[in-house]
């Protein structure tokens, strides 16, 4: 039996064993987040990506400046990083800072002082899962894995053995320090996104990019 056939059989067996547990953990209302007591389960259609939310009536158009605080890495006992290394967590936090700042710059002037008409954004990286090496990419090529991912893509859910990122968003009026909105977000690539399956952090970084875009849309 050739090596390639053995590899396919091994991967197929791995997929079968992991099919029931191929999604990353569901986020929680992390107890160490300042807005934790105000968060409530989200009953809207976007609950898969935003499971908890707190919102007030806000006219976002009255704000034209935003302070983006340094990204915090959550260290509470309910963090969801699994066995991800500290170096990888720092890499994701750095990538998060860059992506959110760059994308928010399209809508706001990036500021450093709490003046009127200014928002203050606090982002806390609370969890992440890595792509499963080799298997994540193989699921986009294997017939059964591709079928599963196709269904997940239609449902807007995670792909098989693919990574994700979870973070808390807290938005304040910078001049009054009043909490305007907060939510927990879980982001991941489209289940059919093959490119996001490369590299251990590929899916998590794609999730960060999607989350930054979504926040800009939310604040319009």
Image (cartoon, rainbow, N blue to C red):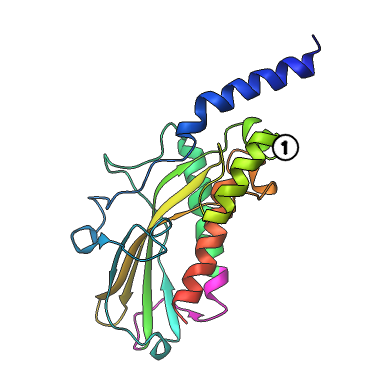
Q: How many marks?
A: 1
Residue 202: x and y, percent?
61, 46
Q: Is residue 7 left or right of residue 34?
A: right
Q: Residue furthest left?
A: 37
In reply to whether residue 108 is colored magenta, the answer given is yes
- In this picture, which residue range is highlighted in magenta? 102-116
**What residue is drawn where x is 42% and y is 60%?**
70
Element type where label 1 sits in the image:
loop
Residue 211: x and y, percent?
50, 62
Q: Residue furthest right?
A: 2
Q: Is residue 98 left or right of residue 117?
A: right
Q: Nearer the viewer, residue 149 or 217?
A: 149
Residue 163: x and y, percent?
53, 42
In this view, 34 is above or below 76: below
Q: Is residue 8 left or right of residue 162?
A: right
Q: Is residue 27 left or right of residue 145?
A: left
**What residue is drawn where x is 59% and y is 38%?**
200
Query: Crowding near pointer 1: few (<14 within 10 Å), some, many (20+)?
Result: few
Residue 170: x and y, percent?
33, 66
* Residue at mark 1: 141
- Which of the 4 image quarters holds residue 198? top right
Q: Main secondary structure of the magenta part?
A: loop
Q: Residue furthest bottom?
A: 62
**What residue is drawn where x is 31% and y is 72%?**
181
Q: Nearer the viewer, residue 195 or 160?
A: 160
Task: Quadrant for the N terminus, please.
Answer: top right
In this view, 83 is above or below 126: above
In reply to whether residue 83 is colored magenta, the answer given is no
In this view, 14 is above or below 121: above
């Amino acid at each position: 039996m050739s090596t390639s056939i053995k590899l396919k059989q091994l991967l197929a067996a791995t997929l079968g064993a992991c099919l029931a547990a191929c999604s990353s953990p569901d986020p929680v209302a992390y107890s160490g987040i300042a807005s934790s007591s105000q968060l409530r389960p989200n009953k809207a259609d976007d609950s898969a990506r935003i499971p908890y939310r707190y919102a007030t009536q806000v006219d976002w158009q009255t704000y034209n400046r935003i302070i983006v605080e340094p990204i915090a890495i959550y260290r509470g006992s309910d963090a969801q990083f699994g066995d991800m290394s500290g170096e990888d967590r720092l890499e994701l936090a750095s990538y998060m800072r860059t992506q959110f700042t760059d994308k928010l710059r399209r809508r706001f002037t990036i500021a450093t002082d709490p003046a009127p008409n200014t928002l203050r954004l606090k982002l806390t990286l609370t969890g992440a899962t890595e792509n499963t090496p080799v298997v994540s990419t193989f699921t986009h090529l294997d017939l059964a894995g591709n079928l599963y991912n196709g269904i997940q893509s239609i449902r807007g859910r995670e792909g098989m053995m693919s990574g994700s990122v979870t973070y808390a968003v807290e938005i304040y009026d910078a001049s009054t320090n009043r909490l305007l909105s907060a939510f927990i977000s879980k982001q991941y690539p489209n289940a059919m996104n093959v490119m996001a399956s490369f590299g251990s952090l590929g899916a998590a970084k794609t999730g960060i990019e999607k989350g930054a875009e979504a926040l800009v849309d939310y604040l319009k």
